[in-house]
Amino acid sequence: GEDVEQSLFLSVREGDSSVINCTYTDSSSTYLYWYKQEPGAGLQLLTYIFSNMDMKQDQRLTVLLNKKDKHLSLRIADTQTGDSAIYFCAEFSGYALNFGKGTSLLVTP
Amino acid sequence: EAGVVQSPRYKIIEKKQPVAFWCNPISGHNTLYWYRQNLGQGPELLIRYENEEAVDDSQLPKDRFSAERLKGVDSTLKIQPAELGDSAVYLCASSDTTETQYFGPGTRLLVL
């Protein structure tokens, strides 16, 4: 399918906020997701947002959705070293998830 | 609640050998997916099951890949014969609705 685009790498200092951006392709996507993948592990569902919403907050995580620009972002407040991982944006397109290539987040002390 | 279970976690085989992966979805989840994740990429769908029926296998390379979900619960994905390019992580996911999928830890396959 068409590409879901993400920046490949982000480095932040512990305690700062992280913002990971994503551009998706299917304007008819009903749900958009953020997954986290730690080394050697599977994908952990972090959060998702329904397409008729423009923001969702869940503890340290804030998701912003701009449907006009097909832009999705994930903000992690007070980023910790344990947040270091690869973060995947995914759109629900038809009956399967269409993933980006992932953003590697490195949190330095 | 137990998550999606996959085995084995790691597999190393020589090219042209067969290999099989097993997945047990979350209890009660009727939809099961197999994805392949190549190094540095996001997962890509191979096949989707609704109960025991494969409803989307358009991305499954049918010359060497096969899958089954005989009783609508566990599933097996097989490759025969394996090629070097099949080295990847094979992920199983399940859902009770079509929107939210939960992933297993994956099987890391290395073909030598």
Image (cartoon, coloured by chain):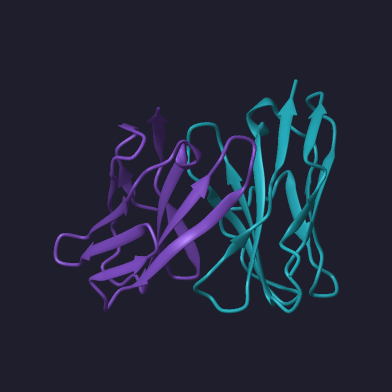
Chain colours: A purple, B cyan
**Residue A109 or residue B81, whichever sits in front:** A109
Q: Quadrant of the C terminus of chain B?
A: top right
Residue at 82% over, 27% down: B13
**Residue A101 or residue B63, whichever sits in front:** A101
Residue at 72% over, 34% down: B109
Q: Is residue A8 above or below residue B27?
A: above
Residue A2: where, in percent of width, then height?
34, 51
Residue A82: where, in percent of width, then height?
50, 40
Q: How many numbered marks are there?
A: 0
Q: Is residue B89 above or below residue B13?
A: below
Residue at 74% over, 26% down: B111
Q: Left or right: where does residue A37 sit relative to residue B89?
A: left
Q: Left or right: where does residue B39 sit relative to residue B30?
A: left
Q: Quadrant of the N terminus of chain B?
A: bottom right
Q: Left or right: where does residue A25 sit relative to residue B110?
A: left
Determine the residue located farthest toward the left in the rendered image: A68
Residue A25: where, in percent of width, then height?
28, 58
Residue at 32% over, 31% down: A13
Residue A4: where, in percent of width, then height?
33, 50
Query: Based on the displayed image, in which of its 4 quarters is residue A65 positioned?
Result: bottom left
Q: Is residue B90 above or below residue B25?
A: above
**Residue B9 or residue A79, whichever sits in front:** A79
